[in-house]
């Protein structure tokens, strides 16, 4: 049994994942079933009637995620963006307004600016690390402040406690996309955030073999409304995807420790490299968000961006020459990845306020032997 006082890794391994009462199986089964036999009409065993509405493997993941983020309720979705869509259509009505960070994940910006805007959602991108800019962006109709810290791909840090206070003054919810930090390094709900969003595709899944998303909340009323729409809108996580994420949560702590240690070495190496103009990593004391990051999280994570001294072509060549770092989108898996945000993950932000510099390279530092990672970058940088 685990409780709220159990340590993080104990919760990651056991919360929601007690041995199967029927068989003693130590690992929760993948309940690949769409429907459940009823003992007489309405006689549900354990409340299950149809797998969009409820599935025991997904329930196990909900309990584990709620325990790790210290929320009252978690819900697992088919992707991070499915979670975001359900959240925004639950928290907002057409005509309502959202403030989001000026360098939010490109897919989040696209969902809001291209899809939900058609439905009537209004939005303002701003500098969330500046409380005055946030106050200036807020309108009477603002329902949500959407914050990513650290942000993708510029690794800007936002003070969650300060942002929560400003959002709450205005009667808005603070949503924190905690994908980059993971609950092992940062628990926004304990710092005043109302909702945590995850792309479980990234560190929570951790092995680049599942696409998924999650929401975790503190308020039980909001949790009820989201759970209703989770079923009513139907973008739920499949039993097998839920099982993959549960399997991965068990090693989240050891993986994150290694991601952080490797990334710290890679950041130092890049800092000294003549082809590198600047290194964006919150673990560096020179990073503008270092002190806030040190206050609100227990490690600096595995994502590093850097700007090449030369223009776009040189940055593209580094991405193409790397061998151990795989040229690919996504992040947070055990293997190291390299990408060019301007041409890849953030291409849809071109021409918008969220456009990223063309000399920028983003690394997702994996858990390989760090000497191999350093040698690879050295030869890719030329
Ligand atoms: C990947 C990502 C998302 C979107 O998640 P999907 O699982 O790809 O839908 C949202 N936020 C951040 C920070 C991400 O990196």
Image: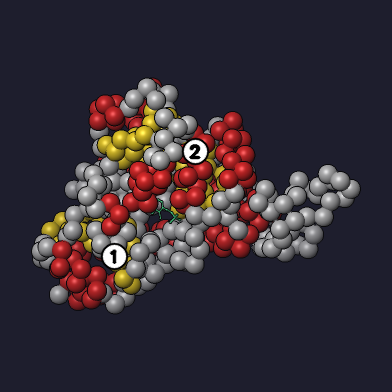
For the question of whether residue 91 can be seen, the reply is yes
Mark 1: is the Cβ under 8 angstroms from ligand 1?
no
Q: On the rendered image, what quadrant is the C terminus found in? A: bottom left
293 versus 305 height, above or below: above
348 versus 118 height, above or below: below
- The location of residue 287, given as percent across then percent down, is 21, 47
Q: Is residue 167 left or right of residue 71?
A: left
For the question of whether residue 7 can be seen, the reply is no
Q: CA distance from mark 1 to mark 2?
A: 32 Å
Check disc 2 and report the residue beneath it: 89
| Helix, strand or loop at mark 2 | helix
Check disc 1 and report the residue beneath it: 339
Determine the residue located farthest toward the front in the rendered image: 118
Instruction: State how many labels appear.
Output: 2
Q: Is residue 271 left or right of residue 137?
A: left
- The location of residue 331, given as percent across then percent down, is 38, 61
Check disc 2: other Cα within 10 Å, few if <14, some if 14-19, many if 20+.
some
Question: Quick check: marks 1 and 2 in contact, CB under 8 Å?
Answer: no
- The location of residue 78, given as percent across then percent down, is 53, 55
**Between tags 1 and 2, which lies in front?**
2
Q: Is residue 22 left or right of residue 122?
A: right
């Amino acid at each position: 049994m685990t409780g709220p006082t159990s340590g993080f890794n104990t919760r990651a391994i056991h919360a929601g994942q007690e041995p199967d009462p029927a068989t003693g199986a130590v690992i929760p089964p993948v309940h690949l079933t769409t429907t459940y036999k009823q003992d007489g009409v309405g006689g549900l065993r354990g409340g299950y009637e149809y797998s969009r509405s409820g599935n025991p493997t997904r329930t196990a993941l909900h309990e584990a995620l709620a325990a790790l983020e210290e929320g009252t309720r978690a819900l697992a979705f088919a992707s991070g963006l499915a979670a975001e869509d359900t959240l925004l259509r639950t928290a907002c009505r057409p005509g309502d307004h959202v403030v989001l960070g000026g360098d939010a994940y490109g897919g989040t910006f696209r969902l809001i600016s291209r899809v939900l805007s058609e439905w009537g959602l209004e939005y303002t991108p701003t500098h969330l690390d500046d409380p005055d800019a946030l106050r200036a962006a807020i309108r009477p109709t603002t329902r949500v402040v959407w914050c990513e810290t650290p942000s993708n791909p510029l690794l800007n840090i936002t003070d969650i406690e300060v942002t929560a206070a400003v959002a709450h003054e205005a009667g808005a919810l603070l949503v924190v996309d905690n994908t980059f930090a993971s609950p092992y390094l940062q628990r926004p709900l304990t710092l005043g955030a109302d909702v945590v969003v995850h792309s479980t595709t990234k560190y929570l899944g951790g092995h680049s073999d599942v696409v998924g998303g999650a929401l975790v909340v503190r308020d039980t009323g909001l949790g009820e409304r989201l759970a209703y729409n989770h079923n009513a809108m139907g973008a739920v996580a499949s039993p097998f995807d839920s099982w993959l994420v549960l399997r991965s949560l068990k090693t989240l702590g050891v993986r994150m420790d290694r991601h952080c240690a490797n990334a710290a070495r890679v950041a130092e190496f890049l800092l000294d490299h003549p082809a590198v103009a600047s290194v964006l990593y919150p673990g560096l004391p020179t990073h503008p968000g270092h002190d806030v990051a040190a206050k609100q999280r227990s490690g600096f994570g595995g994502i590093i961006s850097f700007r090449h001294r030369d223009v776009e072509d040189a940055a593209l060549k580094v991405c193409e020459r790397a061998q151990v770092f795989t040229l690919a989108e996504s992040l947070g898996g055990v293997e190291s990845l390299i990408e060019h945000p301007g041409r890849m993950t953030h291409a849809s932000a071109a021409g918008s306020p969220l456009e990223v510099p063309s000399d920028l390279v983003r690394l997702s530092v994996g858990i390989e032997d760090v000497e191999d990672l350093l040698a690879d970058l050295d030869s890719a940088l030329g």
